[in-house]
Amino acid sequence: MSLDLAHPLDDPDLQAQYEAARALRAPDDPDRFEAGWGNGRIFVSVASFRDPECQKTLVDLFDKAARPERIHVGLIRQHDPVEDAAWLALQPERRGQIREMSFHWRDGLGVCWARFLAQALWRGEDYFLQIDSHMRFEHGWDEILIADLDACPTQ
C-alpha cells in the first residue's frame, strides 16, 4: 500500500498537511498496518464544512453497519470550534475508528482540498467509499455495498 506522491507538492503548507494526514492514526489503529490488515475493511472518506449533520452521519454510519468493526472513517472537519460546538457534542460509539483532522473553517481551502486530505487518511482498507457529511444509511449498508460491488462485471 502506498499513497506516496510522485514528487513533493509545490505548496509547502499543503505538503505539510498531507504528511500530517499520512502520519495520523485513529485511537484503535494498529501501530503498523501489516500486509492483509485491510482485508474486508471499508474506508469511508468524509469532508465536512460546518455541517450540523456530520455527527449524526457518523453515528448512523456505525449504528447501521452489519459489521461496524470493519468500518474506518477519514474525516476532514472544517468548523468553528465555538459556534459549532453544539454540533460536535454527539459522539459515535466507535470514535476510535475515526481518523480526523480538524481545521478552523476560515483556514479551509475548499472541498477538493478536504477530499485530498481525507484520501490521505486511507490505510489500505479493501473498500473505499466517499460520502457527504449529511447522509443516512440503510441497515446492513456495508454488506449491501460489498455484495453490489461483487456483482459488477470485472472487465
Image (spheres, rainbow, N blue to C red):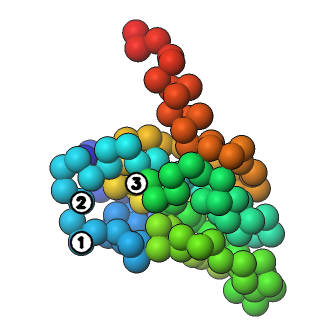
| Residue drawn at the location 80% of the way across and 69% of the way down | 52
- The answer to which image quadrant residue 23 occupies is bottom left
Disc number placed over residue 31 in the picture, else none: 1
Against 133, is 29 above or below? Answer: below
Classed neighbour count for the residue bearing mark 2: other residues with Cα under 10 Å, few (<14), some (14–19), many (≥20): few
Position of residue 95 measured from the top left corner of the image (x, y, whole percent): 54, 74
Decide which of tag 1 and tag 3 comes sooner along the chain: 1
- The answer to which image quadrant residue 15 occupies is bottom left
Position of residue 30 measured from the top left corner of the image (x, y, whole percent): 28, 69
State the SS at label 2: loop
| Residue drawn at the location 80% of the way across and 84% of the way down | 86
Against 115, is 106 above or below? Answer: below
In the image: residue 115, left or right of residue 17: right
Visible residue check, residue 18: yes
- The answer to which image quadrant residue 48 occupies is bottom right
Quadrant holding the C terminus: top left
Give the farthest residue toward the left: 35
In the image: residue 120, left or right of residue 88: left
Q: Nearer the viewer, residue 73 or 120?
A: 73
Classed neighbour count for the residue bearing mark 3: other residues with Cα under 10 Å, few (<14), some (14–19), many (≥20): many
Q: Disc 3 vs disc 2: which is toward the camera?
A: 2
- Residue under pointer 2: 33
- Residue under pointer 3: 122
- Contact, mark 3 vs mark 2 (Cβ under 8 Å): no
Q: Nearer the viewer, residue 50 or 27?
A: 27
Against 69, is 95 above or below? Answer: below
Q: CA distance from mark 1 to mark 2?
A: 7 Å
Q: Amino acid at mark 2?
A: Phe
Q: Amino acid at mark 1?
A: Asp
Q: Disc 1 vs disc 3: which is toward the camera?
A: 1
